Amino acid sequence: MNRMVNVTLATVLMALGLASCWPSIPSARADDSDGRDIPPAFSPFEYLVGQWKGQAMPKNTAQSFRGWPEKHNWAWTFVSGKPTGLSVSIQGSKVLADGKLSYDAGRKLYRLDGHAPKPAGAPITFEGKLNSTGKSLVLEQVAAGPASRGASAPGKLRLTIWPNSNFIRYTMAVDRKEPDAVQFSHAIEVGLTKEGESLAGGTTASDRPRCVVTGGSATMTVTYNGQTFPLCCTGCRDEFNENPEKYIKKAKLMAQSAGAKKASRSAPTRVSRFEDAFSDDVVAEPAKPKARRSMKTTRAKNLRAQKKPAVETDSEPDDEKPAGKDERASSGATSKPRATPSASRAANLLQIGRNLEKSGKTEAALSYYRRIAKDFASTPAAKTARQRIKAIETD
């Protein structure tokens, strides 16, 4: 009895300790050696981390063809060595010069606190959430601030951010609602491409080294004591420099874990965000050794044909019956039931969903789980998919 009380008390104390941390979001990681340390609320935006360049175009104006270049730099922000949000700095923007994206777990809202471009440089705040598809972040200005450069009157702004299907491009749309207007109207649209990426393909995130701080796809490096370590952003660079020994140790654990996993599986399968989590990808099934069975059957038929007299009958000859049917019937052996094509396809889709969920792409994983539950409801994979949907949606 005392033991049960002690265990319960320890559990309560642990829960209270976790609840006091800011923000109250657990880290999304497979295990410590796997190296992933991304807050679940920010896993849909992991693709943003890094440097981007593109072109902004004004909308609904007579000079909509006259755009301007912009550069965006997204990086992780840290509190006590843990990533808690994202920061962004923008060159060339007419709306936002910088900002910090955080998550309010109690209100379930994202908040972007930033500054308008100079010379005004006034504080500006947006709040919002992911849309129903889980792909677009929609943020509305909390309170009307000063007019952006070039605007004649103040108004309320709305930012919408979404990636393209392979996550090497993203769009930031700026909408404006004037004080006397009922709805927002399009103002600016910025299309950006991640630096170092090609729309025609090339190196993917799964091909790159892993960041020793967050475990994300590395796009830069830092050198310490003659050793080079991969990092994903300037925020991780600053965090590494704060405590290099911690991340050197973590890098060794990640390398050991990667080596052990590579040795333990003969045919690894993985899905990266560059394989388009929103498309209809499936994992190819291994080829069945039909040819070998066919050769054995042919030899057996030839032997039976040699032993039988060449007499024509009206009945079906034995050697025309399905291969191996008589032998199995006479020995009393029962054949093992094979999975139906639907069950095999559902299992393949389930594996993709699991890989996406493990890599932090929960919304993309949900799209696969929901498809399995809907289109393959009677398969064993559908039961697991429904369990994962319930677990994610109640998280």
Image: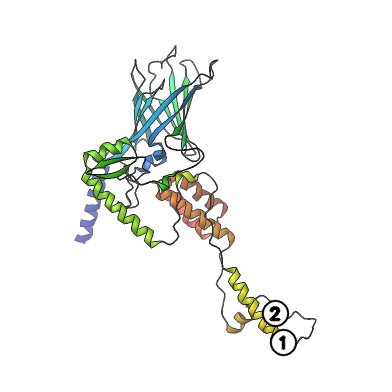
Q: Is residue 203 above or below residue 336?
A: above
Compared across the picture, whether 240 is left or right of 296 comes to left
Q: Which SS class for mark 2?
A: helix
Asked if marks 2 and 1 touch (Cβ < 8 Å), the reply is yes
Q: Which residue is mark 2?
A: 319
User: Within 10 angstroms of label 1, few (less than 14), some, or many (20 or more) residues?
Assistant: few
> What percent of the width, then of the height, locates residue 205?
42, 44
Given residues 98 and 160, the one toward you in this image is 98
> Mark 2 vs mark 1: which is more N-terminal?
1
> What percent of the width, then of the height, locates residue 182?
51, 20
Picture disc at residue 1: none
Picture disc at residue 308: 1
Q: Is residue 54 above or below residue 265?
A: above
Between marks 2 and 1, how big is the CA–CA gap?
10 Å
Residue drawn at 31 percent across, 35 percent down: 234
**Callout 2 amino acid:** Asp
Compared across the picture, whether 181 is left or right of 20 comes to right
Compared across the picture, whether 67 is left or right of 211 comes to right
**Residue 63 visible in the current orientation:** yes
Q: Is residue 192 above or below residue 225?
A: above
